[in-house]
Image (spheres, rainbow, N blue to C red):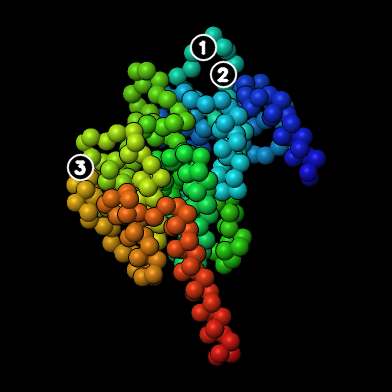
C-alpha cells in the first residue's frame, strides 16, 4: 500500500500538480454531483483508468482565478480533516482564457454533514456531534495558523468520509470550500464576473462585522470564522435547520444579528456546551475565543462528562 501511495505522490508531483482535462482526468458522464451559484462539483476519473488511485471530483468555481501556485493548494490540504486537493485542472486548449478555476479533489463517499443530518431518522447523540465539531476545529486551527480564512463555515461544507452513529472513534469528517469568499487570499475575482461564490456573503452564518455597511477585507478573520462555527454547531444540533428559518428576508436577519439577537437554544444541547456556543457569538471579535481556545473549552467539558460516567459506573455497578 505504501508503494502505491508513494507512486501516486511522485506522479502528481512530477506534473507539478497541474492536470489537463480529458488528458489526465475527465468528468464522468451524467449530471453534476452538486451545483449552486458560481460553483459546480463533477464526479471525475483518472486517465488512463487506475483503480489504485483515489476517487476524485472536479470543483469548478466560476469567475475566479488562483492567487497561488498549484503546490500551495496541495500543501494546504495535507491535514487529516481538510479535503485533499491534488492540484489544478486546466482545459485542453491553452488558447482559451478560462474564467473559472478547477480544483482536483478527493471524493467524499458519505456526502456532507448537512445531508447526513437531513437524511438521518434519528438525531446523532451529543458525543458524536462533539467529535465532529472537534475534528472541524482541528482543521480550522491549521487554516488559521496559515492565515487562511474559510469564510463560509456551514454543515454543507463539512464532508463525511466515515460515520458510525454508535462509535465516535470511527468518525472522519473534513472541511472543504475554504477561501471561496469575499476578499479571499487564495482566489481572485475575474474582472467583470457577476454571479460567483466569491462575491456572496452567507448572511445567516456571518459575523456581525461582516454584515455592516462599511465592511473591509481586514474584518475577515479567524474570529469571524469562529462566529460561523457557532452557527454551524447550532445547525448540527438543530438537525440541519436553516438559521433564522422563521425570518424570510435577509435584511431582517442582518438587523437581528447586528442587534445582538441570538439563535434559540436547541432542546438537545447541554447547557455546558450551549454556554460555549454563545461565547462564539460575542458581538466584538475580541470577546470570541480562538479556535485553539474553543477546542480546549469543548475538550474540557467532554473529558469531564467522560470522567463522570466512569465515576458512576464504578460506584453503582
Are dots 1 and 2 in contact, CB under 8 Å? yes
How far across and how far down the image is residue 315, in percent?
Answer: 56, 90
In the rendered view, would you say 28 is above or below 305? above
CB-based contact (under 8 Å), mark 3 and mark 1: no
- Of the numbered discs 3 and 2, the one sitting upstream in the chain is 2
Judge left or right: residue 105 versus residue 277.
Answer: right
**Near-viewer residue (41 or 67):** 67
Residue sitting at x 36%, y 60%: 277
Q: CA distance from mark 3 to mark 2?
A: 40 Å
Is residue 125 something that shows in the picture? no
Instruction: Name the N-terminal-most of marks 1 and 2.
Output: 2
Are dots 3 and 2 in contact, CB under 8 Å? no
Question: In the drawing, does residue 112 fall left or right of residue 199?
Answer: right
Quadrant where the N terminus is found in the figure: top right
Neighbourhood count class around disc 3 (C-alpha, 10 Å): few under 14, some 14–19, many 20 upward:
few
Q: Which mark is residue 255?
A: none
Distance from disc 3 to disc 1, alpha carbons, whole Å, reads 40 Å
Which residue is located at x 35 percent, y 54 percent? Answer: 288
Residue 251, which numbered label? Answer: 3
Which residue has dot 1 on it? Answer: 96
Q: Which residue is drawn at the image coordinates 62% and 21% (left, top)?
A: 20
Badge 2 is on which residue? 91
Q: Count the marks: how many? A: 3
Point out the frontmost of discs 3 and 2: 3
Separation of marks 1 and 2 at Cα, in angstroms: 8 Å
- Of all residues, the one furthest to the bottom in this rendering is 316
Amino acid at each position: 500500500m505504501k508503494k502505491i501511495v508513494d507512486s501516486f505522490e511522485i506522479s502528481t508531483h512530477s506534473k507539478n500538480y497541474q492536470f489537463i482535462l480529458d488528458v489526465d482526468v475527465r468528468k464522468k458522464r451524467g449530471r453534476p454531483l452538486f451545483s449552486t451559484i458560481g460553483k459546480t462539483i463533477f464526479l471525475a476519473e483518472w486517465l488512463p483508468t487506475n483503480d489504485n488511485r483515489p476517487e476524485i471530483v472536479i470543483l469548478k468555481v466560476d469567475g475566479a482565478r488562483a492567487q497561488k501556485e498549484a503546490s500551495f493548494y496541495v500543501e494546504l490540504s495535507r491535514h487529516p480533516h481538510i479535503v485533499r486537493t491534488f492540484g489544478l485542472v486546466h482545459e485542453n486548449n491553452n488558447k482559451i482564457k478560462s474564467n473559472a478555476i478547477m480544483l482536483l479533489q478527493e471524493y467524499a463517499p458519505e456526502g456532507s454533514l448537512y445531508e447526513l443530518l437531513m437524511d438521518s431518522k434519528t438525531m446523532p447523540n451529543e458525543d458524536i456531534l462533539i467529535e465532529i465539531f472537534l475534528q472541524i476545529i482541528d482543521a480550522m486551527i491549521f487554516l488559521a495558523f496559515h492565515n487562511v480564512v474559510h469564510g463560509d463555515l456551514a454543515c454543507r461544507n463539512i464532508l463525511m468520509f466515515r460515520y458510525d452513529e454508535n462509535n465516535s472513534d470511527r468518525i472522519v469528517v473534513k472541511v472543504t470550500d475554504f477561501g471561496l469568499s469575499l476578499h479571499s487570499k487564495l482566489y481572485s475575482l475575474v474582472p467583470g464576473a457577476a454571479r460567483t461564490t466569491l462575491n456572496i456573503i452567507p448572511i445567516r452564518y456571518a459575523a456581525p462585522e461582516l454584515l455592516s455597511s462599511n465592511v473591509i477585507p481586514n474584518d475577515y478573520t479567524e474570529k469571524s470564522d469562529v462566529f460561523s462555527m457557532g452557527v454551524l454547531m447550532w445547525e448540527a444540533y438543530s438537525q440541519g435547520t436553516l438559521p433564522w428559518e422563521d425570518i424570510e428576508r435577509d435584511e431582517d436577519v442582518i438587523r437581528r444579528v447586528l442587534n445582538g439577537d441570538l439563535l434559540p437554544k436547541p432542546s438537545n444541547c447541554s447547557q455546558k456546551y450551549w454556554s460555549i456556543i454563545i461565547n462564539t457569538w460575542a458581538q466584538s471579535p475580541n470577546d470570541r475565543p480562538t479556535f485553539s481556545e474553543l477546542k480546549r473549552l469543548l475538550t474540557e467539558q467532554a473529558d469531564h462528562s467522560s470522567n463522570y460516567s466512569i465515576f458512576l459506573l464504578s460506584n453503582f455497578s
